[in-house]
Image (cartoon, helix red, strand yellow):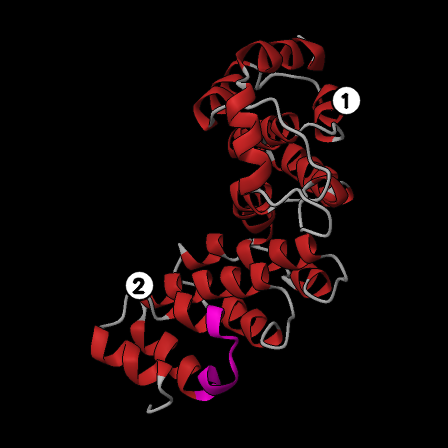
Amino acid sequence: MTANDIRVKLKSLGSPERAEMSKRYFKTGPGQYGEGDIFYGNSAAEMRGLARDYQALADDEILKLLRSPFHEERAVALLIFVRRFAKADSATRRRIYALYLAHTAFINNWDLVDVSAPHVVGAYLADKSRKPLYRLVRSRSLWERRISIVATFHFIRQNDFSDTLELSQRLLADKEDLIHKAAGWMLREVGKRDTDAARTFLAEHYQRMPRTMLRYAIERFPEAERQAYLKGLI
């Protein structure tokens, strides 16, 4: 069972048409956030199936995939880590978490972050200090900053909102739209579970929130309330 086995299967299952669509969808053009990324053209179901079938892959083979120039190889590597982490003992979880943070340069698109950060970083830090998230949120890397906020989805599911709110506040001045979307998404998830917590945060910050962050955060609010926020009338 090797990384090359997965590589061969991804290549054989790939679709040139889907690969071209993925290049556009994940913004791989010059100057875009996914510049230079390349694809086989695999479906999410195919990648998840391979992660399931190869979840016993050795760490060094997983890292070969994670360091690949092909997007789908990196995705499968992360999906394997997620599956392994969920079933692992504490020592193995610590190792997966450490490997994850040592390879953030390869976790370099929004889907790769979103499919993995809550299940590895968030899950690992659930009963530990959250300081690593505050180091990540200060990073120059867009993807590390996105990891910091999306990882808190794990805490949100446990009705623990404090880090999501604090990190969202620190990201109010971020220049990247993908960060605005991520923070707004997490605020929306807070609001689905505790509308008072979300409204308290919004009342203090909505007038200086990036428009995209605000729109994502209030997406589930009643229409009249949404319009009041958007018009600055709260």
Q: Secondary structure at mark 2?
A: helix
Which of the pair 84/205 is nearer the observer?
Answer: 205
Give residue 31's position: percent from left, percent from top.
Answer: 73, 52
Residue depicted at 51% across the width and 34% down the height: 86
Residue type highlighted by circle 2: Lys
Task: Specify whether residue 211 is painted magenta.
Answer: yes
Rate crowding at label 1 as few (under 14), some (14 to 19) or many (20 or more) other CA atoms within 10 Å: few
Question: In terms of image quadrants, where is residue 38?
Answer: top right
Q: Residue furthest bottom?
A: 233
Which of the pair 165/86 is nearer the observer?
Answer: 165
Residue depicted at 35% across the width and 80% down the height: 199
How many badges with numbers are in the image? 2
The image's mark for residue 192 is 2
Give residue 211's position: percent from left, percent from top.
Answer: 47, 74
Please say whether residue 177 is visible from this viewpoint: yes
Magenta highlight range: 204-212
Give residue 104's position: percent from left, percent from top.
Answer: 73, 45
Residue depicted at 60% across the width and 16% down the height: 56
Left or right placement of residue 122 versus residue 206 in this view = right
The image's mark for residue 10 is none
Left or right placement of residue 66 versus residue 72 in this view = right
Which of the pair 92/106 is nearer the observer?
Answer: 106
Residue holding disc 1: 60
